[in-house]
């Protein structure tokens, strides 16, 4: 069997990352390439496919040749002499086309196994991409927390100055410090989560858990969404596998019909005859050679009819399974598309909120210049600003994760 090699890795990455920064695209493509080369799961499916393909040579055989040797303990006397021993050979041959049907059946099973490789590669690429985006979001959140901690330190300096001139209390300073402690705690927790996700990604790449993963500095929300071709869903490998399985049942039934046909046998018997010492004639002691033809007919065997019925039921089962899986994939695609739209809406909302929070912060700073700053308002605005920044990062991550799912389903 020959297959056209398609670099699905390249197709996937180009489709999934057509809107991503070049540096990030190259880094993620490198990670995906490493995963595809090192994955034991893909190696497992490739070995299963090779083993299934090798079975073609196994079925390309005919039944064993039968040999028999017999010795007459009590030698039967015939007119030409006593029979001493018998040698026989017999070869049964399947009906015309049976071996070809076996090869076609086994090849169709191997075709179905090949789809497992394609599916495993797609899933692995999606998993690596999603893990990568999780790492990006984690790192971006840590950066935001660091920036906000520095901002609070600036506010703390302002508060200390205000305390000195009697315009603020020590409680305001303590509240700002406690808020910094909370943010540092969040950052430390995120740092541990980053290590856990990094271990997950390294396991997907089948390499040491502590290998450092470099992620892009920032991700931008694309100006527009890439086009989703829902027609391609019908050509998804998960569905094509059911088509291959259906075809294998068709080949199984053709093989069943061939095997229900008679088998032809050819044989030869040789009987050694000893000479009669008391007689002298032309055929005295002449050995016996007997060519034979046999026919094996499954007259009382119902297994072939039963196998036909089983094949019909199995084809109906595969059809139902395919429709069920198609419904599931359509649901997943619709959900991914809608969640990607929601991520864009959320991003735009957080962007507006951040601008307004920044404006509020500027007003507070100007108020400080006139000596009327309220540090309770400072903490409220800072908390809102942090919330909007975190939500914005989640929106970007969600957009790219859902795009990865869409590409898994449609490309």
Image (cartoon, rainbow, N blue to C red):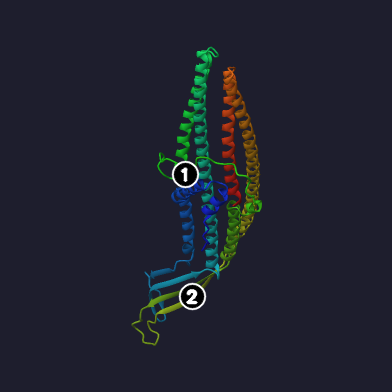
Q: Nearer the viewer, mark 1 or mark 2?
A: 1
Neighbours of disc 2 within 10 Å: few (<14), some (14-19), many (20+): few
Vertical placement of residue 342 versus 108, above or below: above
Residue at the far front in the pictured view: 370
Q: Mark 1 = which residue?
A: 204
Identified at 63% across, 53% down, the residue is 232
For marks 1 and 2, the one nearer the N-term is 1
Relative image position of residue 61 (x, y in whole percent):
47, 66
Asked if the residues shown at circle 1 and circle 2 are in contact, with their CB atoms under 8 angstroms apart, the answer is no
Neighbours of disc 1 within 10 Å: few (<14), some (14-19), many (20+): many
Task: Please state which of residues 232 and 247 is positioned toward the viewer in this rendering.
Answer: 232
Left or right of 226 in this view: 182: left
Task: Please state which of residues 381 and 190 is positioned toward the viewer in this rendering.
Answer: 381
Identified at 51% across, 60% down, the residue is 5
Relative image position of residue 376 (x, y in whole percent):
58, 18
**Local SS, label 1:** helix
Task: Please state which of residues 43 and 243 is positioned toward the viewer in this rendering.
Answer: 43
Q: Mark 2 = which residue?
A: 292
Left or right of 240 in this view: 207: left
Left or right of 138 in this view: 328: right
Identified at 47% across, 44% down, the residue is 204
* Alpha carbons under labels 1 and 2: distance apart: 64 Å
């Amino acid at each position: 069997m020959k297959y056209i090699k398609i670099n699905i890795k390249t197709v996937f990455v180009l489709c999934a990352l057509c809107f991503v920064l070049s540096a990030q695209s190259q880094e993620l493509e490198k990670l995906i390439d490493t995963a595809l080369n090192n994955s034991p799961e893909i190696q497992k499916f490739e070995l299963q496919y090779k083993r299934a393909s090798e079975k073609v040579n196994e079925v390309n055989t005919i039944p064993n040749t039968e040999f028999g040797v017999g010795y007459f303990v009590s030698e039967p006397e015939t007119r030409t002499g006593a029979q001493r021993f018998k040698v026989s050979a017999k070869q049964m041959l399947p009906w015309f086309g049976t071996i070809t049907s076996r090869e076609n059946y086994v090849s169709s099973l191997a075709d179905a196994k090949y789809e497992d490789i394609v599916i495993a590669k797609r899933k692995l690429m999606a998993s690596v991409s999603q893990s990568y985006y999780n790492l990006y979001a984690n790192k971006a959140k840590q950066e935001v927390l660091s920036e906000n901690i520095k901002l609070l330190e600036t506010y703390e300096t302002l508060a200390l100055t205000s305390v000195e001139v009697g315009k603020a209390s020590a409680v305001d300073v303590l509240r700002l410090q406690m808020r910094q402690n909370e943010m540092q705690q969040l950052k430390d927790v995120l740092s541990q989560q980053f290590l856990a996700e990094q271990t997950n990604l390294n396991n997907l790449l089948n390499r040491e858990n502590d290998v450092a993963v470099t992620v892009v500095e920032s991700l931008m929300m694309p100006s527009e969404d890439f086009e989703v071709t829902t027609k391609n869903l019908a050509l998804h490998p998960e569905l094509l596998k059911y088509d291959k399985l259906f075809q294998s049942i068709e080949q199984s039934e053709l093989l069943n019909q061939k095997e229900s046909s008679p088998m032809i046998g050819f044989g030869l018997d040789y009987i050694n005859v000893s000479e009669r010492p008391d007689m002298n004639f032309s055929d005295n002691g002449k050995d016996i050679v007997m060519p034979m033809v046999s026919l094996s007919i499954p007259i009382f065997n119902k297994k072939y009819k039963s196998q036909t019925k089983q094949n019909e039921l199995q084809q109906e089962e595969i059809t139902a399974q395919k429709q069920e899986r198609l419904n599931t994939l359509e649901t997943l695609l619709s959900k991914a598309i809608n969640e990607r739209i929601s991520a864009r809406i959320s991003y735009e909302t957080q962007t507006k909120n951040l601008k307004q929070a920044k404006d509020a912060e500027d007003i507070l700073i100007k108020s400080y210049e006139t000596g009327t700053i309220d540090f309770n308002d400072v903490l409220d605005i800072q908390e809102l600003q942090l919330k909007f920044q975190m939500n914005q990062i989640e929106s970007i991550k969600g957009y790219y994760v859902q795009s990865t799912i869409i590409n898994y389903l449609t490309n």
